[in-house]
Image: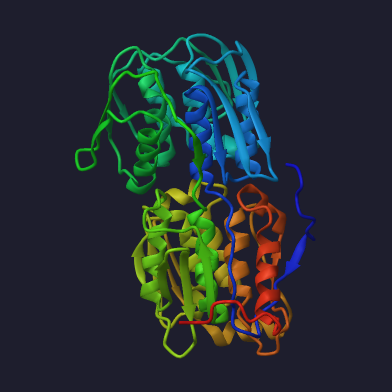
Amino acid sequence: MSNLPSLPSVLPIRPFTEPARGEVMLPGSKSITNRALLLAALCDGPVTLTGALFSEDTEIMAEALNRLGIEVQSDAGAKTFQVTGKGGEIPAQSADIFIGNAGTAARFLTALCASAKSGVYRLDGVPQMRKRPMKGLIDALRSLGADIRCTGAEGFFPLEIRARGLRGGRVEIDASESSQMLSALLMVAPLSDKPTTVQVVSKVRRPFVQMTLGLLDQFGQNAIEYDFRGKLFRVSRNPNYRFDGIYCVEPDATAASYFLALPIAAKGSLLIPGLSYAQLQGDALFIAVLQHVGAKIVGKASGFQSSHDGSSNVSGVTRDFSGFSDTFLTLAAIAPLLDGPSTIAGIAHTRKQETDRVAGMAKELQRLGHGVDEKTDSLTITPNLAEMKMRAQAGIIEIETYGDHRFAMSFAILGCYDLLGTGRPWLAIRNPACCAKTFPNFFDVLGQVWEDSHSRTNPTFPQPA
């Protein structure tokens, strides 16, 4: 990826010795950017995305579309993608596509290639991508007539797709391991030869599917009937995707979780412009979790303001994160600062994401000295601040990120807490550059908030309410 910030292999985090203050401009949503790229590619003619995320995952998606003969012009400085859609056609009759470890791109592009009328497409990624679940989507596409060959282990990458279109009809899908599989199927189902009825035979993580349905409606697919209670979706045949004008990508709600949580660690008040109650993204549900913890979060015309002045308790919580699981690491990382245990449930599927997030989080919290009860689908975290302080006094504690961007960003927020009372770094992040996956300049943004918060010359920042 171009223009990556230069970061050391191990990055100490500067604690805040002054309350956080200022504004944080977030990157665009990864989930929306990659969905909008796919849907724009299905339109007939150009669509411009503004406020888009530029990261490893979205650049992988854009490059793959270019390889398929669908022109995508990128301008990282302006945060725009211009996609010249081909009305559902894939011009390239053969392509080798490298996915890296981008789960959204893997599932969306598999469905897109399977929907083509002809062509041979080979998809592969890094070794970890070859372990990530694909079987539910592969089985569903095959039942709709797709010729998908797993050239390694059955149900996983690498894949060879010999496209011959999708016939439509009734199909069942197991999306228990990733809602992206259902989203991928719904986005290409209008291209099928006849209407498609999708019956989900597993749990449905509703927020991300609702996001997909919202985008489909925005791109002209407004005749989809769905029943979440019955887990049934009826999709009309309609190859006419369209979007008139410029598509504005929402700020990333998962990225917002880190800075909304920062006042818990550093006290103070931060404004996150662009967030609204009308967000398509389900991860905005994390706001209610932080409010329960004790943060004061207020929706304003310009965005959301998160505050905590340290005068009131911050309490542990018990919450099911199945619908917004990307944010569970944010809560887990600040759980050591809360009063009492926190139980995070509904997270078994995150064991098969960039890494085993449940096991990794348990291990890193135990490294810090906290009690962790790890179960298949949950973590219960019992804080032990005294033990964490004692370990930090012996030397900086290095957090392993497992190549997972969300470990790096979540624990960076914990490191902003002035544990030793001296402003001396006590926590460091290994491989901080892994944030390039979704938030390449995260540490620059966090550093700027630190500078702004410790500056006594700029009086314009919002103060805690």
- The quarter of the rendered structure image containing the C terminus is bottom left
In this rendering, position of residue 407 left or right of residue 164? right
* Image location (x, y in percent) of residue 214: 36, 40
In this rendering, position of residue 431 left or right of residue 288? right
- The quarter of the rendered structure image containing the N terminus is top right
Coloring scheme of the render?
rainbow
* Image location (x, y in percent) of residue 364: 59, 67
- Is residue 303 placed above or below 280 in the rendered structure? below
Give whichever of 415, 72 is nearer the camera: 72
* Residue at x 59%, y 73% (from the top left corner): 22
- Is residue 204 placed above or below 297 in the rendered structure? above
* Residue at x 41%, y 58% (from the top left corner): 276
Q: Can the viewer see residue 127? A: no
- Number of labels in the image equals 0
In this rendering, position of residue 342 left or right of residue 460? left
Give whichever of 186, 85 is nearer the camera: 85
In this rendering, position of residue 353 left or right of residue 415? left
- Is residue 209 placed above or below 140 in the rendered structure? below
* Image location (x, y in percent) of residue 442: 65, 59
Give whichever of 85, 350 is nearer the camera: 85
* Residue at x 42%, y 67% (from the top left corner): 300
Q: Can the viewer see residue 275? A: yes
- Quadrant location of residue 451? bottom right
Give whichever of 5, 316 is nearer the camera: 5
* Image location (x, y in percent) of residue 195: 28, 18
